[in-house]
Amino acid sequence: MLSIPGKPGRTCDGWSRRELMRIGGLSLLGVSLPDVLRMEAKAAPARVESKIQPRAKQVVMIFLQGGPSHIDIWDPKPEAPANIRGEFKAIKTKVDGIQVSETMPMLADVMDKVTLIRSMSYTPSGLFNHTAAMYQMMTGWPPDKVSPSGQLEPPSPRDFPHMGCHIANMLPPEGPMLPFVEMPRPLQESNVIGKGGAAGFLGKAHDPYRLYQDPNKTVRLDDLSLRSEVSPERFKDRFELLKGINGSMKELDKAVSSYALNEYYEKAYDLVLSGKARDAFDLAKEKDATRDRYGRHTFGQSLLMSRRLIEAGTRFVQVNWPSVANGNPEVDAWDTHAANFGPLKNIHCPKLDRGLSAFLTDMDDRGLLKDTLVVVTGEFGRSPKLGVSTSGNVNSPDGRDHWPYCYTAIVAGGGTKRGVQYGASDAQASSPADKPVHPVDLVATVYYSLGIEPRMEVLNDLKQPRALVEGSPVLGLFS
């Protein structure tokens, strides 16, 4: 629900009601205090009973927005014709019988920690461009408003919520910590920004905390800090004064119950005063060797920050690949229509390989994989055959187009199996040969891992009952 501007290490004095509200960034939403409080009153955690035994307590979603080429990264086909197998060779991994592309040597050494799902697949409605695919992957629901270009309408309060918003609502963190953090940039294709990345009909109070900054640079954290000239004791006194003033304001009493009012201020107060969130974002507390291991780039440092957030108690962290979905592949985008092999070899895969292998090793060494489900996926893969058009785009002879019919995802931790492959693609990596997994099934699996019934009913913006997700959890992923 928030963005973090400002500078690090600051504190505040003279808190007004407006300034206190800014602690949570809610003033950025353009709503009045009574509106905010009404949202908070409606946003009480939807705790539900479930017969599902939770395997995980937290989730890290590593979203490679843009559609990485599965055949050139996770699912090489060395025996396929040259115009399919491409330029890269297959290499062995730590798991007998599983190979990956030569672009991922470090990941090959940690393959014993993950399950490789090589049978992700779906058939889209209409043109399959990025925005529609991302919306489905984040919410577990197919898009209902697709333009002729295949893109969606801008984000709407009527959208289905991102799974992280539902999870943060149902399973709020223990203690003063941010429930759902998204970084380092929003989901985006062209001018459609943030579709599928918000709380939708749950309300803005459940939007993720958005850190749209580069963790490889200095991160500004004014909203999570107290000014140095204000002691915690003085801040506490001002907090008690604000509570007293608010209690005497009849219009606020009408807007929200005293419980919700106190609850909101107490959360904001505890979050700032505890310093847990601020410290979690402070990568200066890490050793240089650790930061180097993750890679001194936006993606690597975002993964390191996500590990720190998990340690601090954040329930759901999403790391988006730091490039727009249809960006320039020569810069940092997976959308390799015009050029596939050069950018993968020289730019994208080295960052992905170093960052992801370091993250998985670090999480495992610290015992965090036991209670954390890690999901690594894009919105689709790339066409097995080079130089063809599958989505209406123009592709160069060495480019690959969008391909939702078969691609690869990785899961790790949270009770999932280690060192195995789930499902398989055919000889050309064009369709599943075994155990197809739809994106909505992967979303259902995330809910299931946390002990949440995927098909439990929630009310949409029209108060109509809808399932969290209509997919089925992939039980074969779990030990």
Image (cartoon, rainbow, N blue to C red):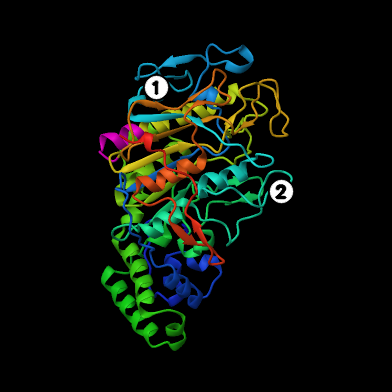
Q: Nearer the viewer, residue 202 or 212?
A: 202
SS of the residue under disc 1: helix
Q: Position of residue 348 (x, y in %)?
A: 52, 29
Please report the residue visible at 50 percent of the width from the left and 27 percent of the height from the top.
349
Q: Nearer the viewer, residue 152 or 397?
A: 152
> As shown in the figure, which amino acid type bears the numbered disc 1?
Ala
Q: Is 442 left, or right, of 121 in this rendering?
A: left
Q: Does the magenta portion include 366? A: yes
Q: Does the magenta portion include 377? A: no
Q: Is residue 188 above or below residue 30?
A: above
Q: Is 91 left, or right, of 280 in this rendering?
A: right
Please report the residue visible at 55 percent of the width from the left and 49 percent of the height from the top.
141
Q: Which contiguous range is marked in magenta? A: 359-368
Please report the residue visible at 33 percent of the width from the left and 35 percent of the height from the top.
290
Q: Which residue is mark 2?
A: 147
> As shown in the figure, which amino acid type bears the numbered disc 2?
Ser
Q: Nearer the viewer, residue 352 or 170?
A: 170
- Residue 258 in view of the camera: yes
Q: Position of residue 205 (x, y in %)?
A: 47, 64
Q: Which residue is mark 1?
A: 108
Q: Which mark is residue 446?
A: none
Please report the residue visible at 64 percent of the width from the left and 34 percent of the height from the top.
328
How busy is the neighbourhood of tag 1: few (under 14 within 10 Å), some, or many (20 plus)? many
Task: Name the mark nearer the viewer: 2 or 1.
Answer: 2
Mark 2 and mark 1 lie on one chain; the one further toward the N terminus is: 1
